[in-house]
Image (cartoon, helix red, strand yellow):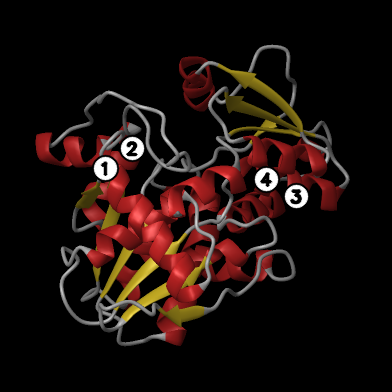
Amino acid sequence: MPITLAQVEEARRNIAGTALRTPLVRFNSDVPDLYLKLENLQPIGSFKVRGAANVMARTPRERLARGVLTASAGNMAQGVAFCARRMGIPATVIAPDTAPATKIRAVERMGGKVIKVPFAEWWHTFETRSYPGVDATFIHAFDDPDVMAGNGTIALELLEDLPDLDAVVIPFGGGGLSCGIAAVLRARAPRVRIYAAEVETAAPLAASLAAGEPRTVEYQPSFVDGIGSKTVFPNMFELARKLLDGSLVVTLNDAAAAMKLLAERNRIIAEGASACAVAAALSGRAGSGKIVAIVSGGNIDLDKFAGLVV
């Protein structure tokens, strides 16, 4: 079932003082009424701190005392490590061996232990919610109502800052961000169109929505590392099918062009996942009116970023 407004309101109280209320700004592009929700300005450079802070606030202290474990390509890893450091507990991260160095270094700076594994082993950790030899409380990056409630606080801010918005485009990784935001919008502003954004090299939601059931797709690693996988968890697919109006798939070239435009026009450093949402919004497929693209994070290796925006 989707999360409730009561859960999201509680999450807002739980994360106060840890996560920021991020600005909503107009995108200085040629598309009128396109706005950017700047989650890249969070303390860890990503929205993931919202979900991590809420789930850890709601987890009994005795369960946290033995430490926390998560599987992440880098952003949830930072969120968990950031909160764990504030709480004085150890954090272990299972990361794919393709994870960007800048995200891994950030986790280690926060005191987190990183174990890099092949993609298949990393994905298996999501499914089993455990890792051999690590005795810690598992924090799921997306398939957890408390994580989604933390993410849903973004929607509360959107409706307060732009109550007459018409559409929102959200990067789709595991679905925790899009389903958290969508649950609030469906309850408070059901007229708003809600779209996921995926990249062509890893777009399981679009394939699954077309088939009416979860599908496995070929996964190709790229600079878009914060979203994209080989499949969609069945329960997340059911939520997405109920809450979202569809998935807008963009090319790698589209994402790179959006990344460059964000830097040129608004002086924003956005990672690939964020750029996919912006590219999808720029394409016109989200419709007309006031459209918000969720800039989910800005954690990208600067050398890679420089090569993409030249």
Between disc 4 and disc 1, the foreground one is 4
Q: Amino acid at mark 3?
A: Phe
How packed mark 3 is, by other alpha carbons closer than 10 Å (few <14, some 14-19, many 20 or more), is many
- Toward the left, the furthest residue is 211
Mark earlier in primary sequence (4, 1): 4
Gap in angstroms between the C-alphas marked 2 and 4 = 25 Å
CB under 8 Å between discs 3 and 2: no
Name the quadrant containing residue 162.
Answer: bottom left
Q: Residue at x 53, y 50 (%)?
A: 306
Q: Relative to 72, say whether 240 is above or below.
A: below
- Toward the right, the furthest residue is 88
CB under 8 Å between discs 1 and 2: yes
Residue 136 drawn at (x, y percent): 73, 27
Q: Does residue 2 appear in the picture of this structure?
A: no
Residue 254 drawn at (x, y percent): 28, 52
Residue 235 located left or right of residue 191: right
How packed mark 1 is, by other alpha carbons closer than 10 Å (few <14, some 14-19, many 20 or more), is some
Gap in angstroms between the C-alphas marked 4 and 1 = 28 Å
